[in-house]
């Protein structure tokens, strides 16, 4: 039984915010405190590399809620205050303002921190990451004056930035250590499609290529030298080489760590009074049949709802189907499910025309679907996978097969138990 | 009556609202952006619409009590 005297949430990203909101939505009446290490009121990070960076949306659009929301929901929001230590035996937190805060149940929503570049010159002016709204503002300003842009890392964030840079007239050089772009997130056909898509717009991809050093003059970046010895002039170097789970607080408390704060299917850590949610935790995924740690809005918010249900006394194991999205300029990449290896891929749609889905099967079972500008394939895939309704590879690849109608019918049947 | 508003500029085509309240939300086939089928929410659809607002990954749905 969870002690519901008071709940303290460390972190105010999607998972922390959702946990607080869902506690109140579920009728929790005890004190709820959110420790937001950021001086800004809680905001959404995903748009920072998308609509916010292009200038399409402003900072007010990023906020989870207006200030009055926290008062109305009786959520104590403490901006600019970090938890520095946990005393698990006494169930207290040591805070950055020097005070001690007791908790009945503690929810760690500490998120991730960017993997840092360590080559010579990494700390030069002009070498930037994209994590906070301040980073995004800095990059947006530098894009106006930069002449030569180099991007290190071709994952979601790196490529979202590339799409923005291209739209502003730049032709960046992109260094990617792996043999293909988006290698960790997407299937080969999607990687190949976006490689060709961006190359046509003048982007210079160097695959299987790492960064060796950054040349500087007077502390400012002037060039990136890659592992093959090529020198790329650069006055703006954007680093997107992935993130690491923020586990330092959990480690200090002696919690079990396994590529993140390890939790059970109810999101409980190895301490019964501490849970962990979102990007910072690894958990046994029923979808994948293995322990995973995911970085996504879906994962973060569904975790928040799941942990809130446990705290109010209606626990249910976490079983949500993972899904992801990325805005690549005007193209939308959507992913349903998790691909940890597939033995069959079926293409649906128009691969060359940039409107297609890749249905991935393993041992005859549909495990993941990548969609580029095929939102209805994505929705259908989520419906089918969530309801565990099989879709044959023949049907998936048949342009005359009405996938949307099939998925709608499957979902209705599952919902009514028919 | 509850009124629902949808900000299509914020929408990320996640389709969550369509799962939660298909009588009130649909999606454009070409880009997945949500469309509102009705602004006024009758009593029997209120729970679904509240859920839609809660699970929207982009916070693009707002509710107005009248």
Image (tube, rainbow, N blue to C red):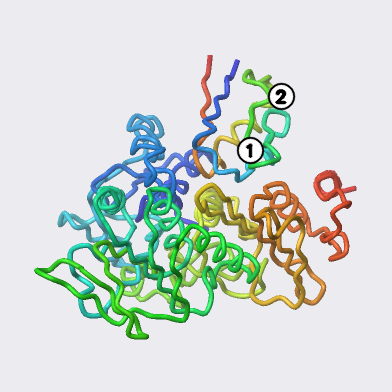
Q: Residue at x 58, y 19 (%)?
A: B2
User: For this view, does B26 lie left or right of residue A229?
Assistant: right
Q: Position of residue B39 (x, y in %)?
A: 62, 20
Q: Position of residue A312 (x, y in %)?
A: 53, 48
Position of residue A392 relative to residue A143, above or below, is below
Q: Nearer the viewer, residue A14 or A202?
A: A202
User: For this view, does A257 lie left or right of residue A26?
Assistant: left
Q: Position of residue B53 (x, y in %)?
A: 56, 35
Which residue is identified by label 2? B44
Q: Nearer the viewer, residue A320 or A377?
A: A377
Q: Chain of mark 1?
A: B
Label 2 crowd (10 A; few <14 / some 14-19 / many >=20):
few
Whether residue A307 is visible here, answered yes or no, is no
Residue A62 sits in which quadrant?
top left
Q: Residue at x 64, y 30 (%)?
A: B35
User: For this view, does B36 lie left or right of residue A273?
Assistant: right
Whether residue B60 is visible here, answered yes or no, is yes
Which residue is identified by label 1? B17
Of all residues, the one furthest to the bottom in this rendering is A228
């Amino acid at each position: 039984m969870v002690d519901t005297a008071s709940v303290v949430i460390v972190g105010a990203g999607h998972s922390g915010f959702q946990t607080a909101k869902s506690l109140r939505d579920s009728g929790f009446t005890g004190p709820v405190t959110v420790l937001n290490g950021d001086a800004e009121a809680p905001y959404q990070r995903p748009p920072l590399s998308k609509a916010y960076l292009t200038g399409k949306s402003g900072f007010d659009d990023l906020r989870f809620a207006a200030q009055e929301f926290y008062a109305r929901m009786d959520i104590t929001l403490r901006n600019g205050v970090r938890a520095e230590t946990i005393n698990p035996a006494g169930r207290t937190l040591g805070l950055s303002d020097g005070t001690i805060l007791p908790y009945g149940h503690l929810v760690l929503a500490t998120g991730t921190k960017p993997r840092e570049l360590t080559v010579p010159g990494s700390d030069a002016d002009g070498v930037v990451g994209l994590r906070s709204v301040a980073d995004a503002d800095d990059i947006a300003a530098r894009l106006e004056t930069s002449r030569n842009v180099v991007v290190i890392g071709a994952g979601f964030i790196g490529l979202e930035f590339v799409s923005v840079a291209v739209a502003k007239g730049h032709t960046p050089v992109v260094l990617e250590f792996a043999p293909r772009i988006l290698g960790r997130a997407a299937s080969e056909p999607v990687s190949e499609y976006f490689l060709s898509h961006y190359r046509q717009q003048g982007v210079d991809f160097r695959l299987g290529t790492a960064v060796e050093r950054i040349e500087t003059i007077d502390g400012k970046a002037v060039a990136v030298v890659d592992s093959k010895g090529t020198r790329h002039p650069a006055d703006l170097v954007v680093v997107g080489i992935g993130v690491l789970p923020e586990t330092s607080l959990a480690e200090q408390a002696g919690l079990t760590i396994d590529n993140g704060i390890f939790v059970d299917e109810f999101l409980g850590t190895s301490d019964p009074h501490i849970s962990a949610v979102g990007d910072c935790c690894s958990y046994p995924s029923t979808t994948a049949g293995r322990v995973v740690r995911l970085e996504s809005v879906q994962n973060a918010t569904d975790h928040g709802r799941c942990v809130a249900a446990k705290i109010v006394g209606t626990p249910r194991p976490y079983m949500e189907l993972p899904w992801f999205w990325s805005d690549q300029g005007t193209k939308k990449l959507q992913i349903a499910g998790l691909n940890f290896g597939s033995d069959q891929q079926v293409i649906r749609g128009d691969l060359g025309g940039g409107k297609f889905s890749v249905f991935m099967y393993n041992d005859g079972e549909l495990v993941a679907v990548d969609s580029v500008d095929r939102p209805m394939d994505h929705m259908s895939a989520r419906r089918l996978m969530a309801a565990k309704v099989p879709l044959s590879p023949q049907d998936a690849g048949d342009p005359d097969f009405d996938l949307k109608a099939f998925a709608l019918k499957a979902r209705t049947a599952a919902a009514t138990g028919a | 009556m509850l009124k629902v508003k949808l900000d299509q500029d914020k929408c990320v085509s996640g389709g969550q609202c369509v799962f939660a309240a298909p009588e009130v939300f649909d999606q454009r086939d070409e880009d997945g952006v949500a469309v509102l089928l009705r602004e006024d929410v009758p009593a029997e659809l209120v729970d679904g619409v509240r859920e839609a607002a809660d699970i929207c990954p982009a916070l693009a749905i707002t509710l107005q009590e009248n």
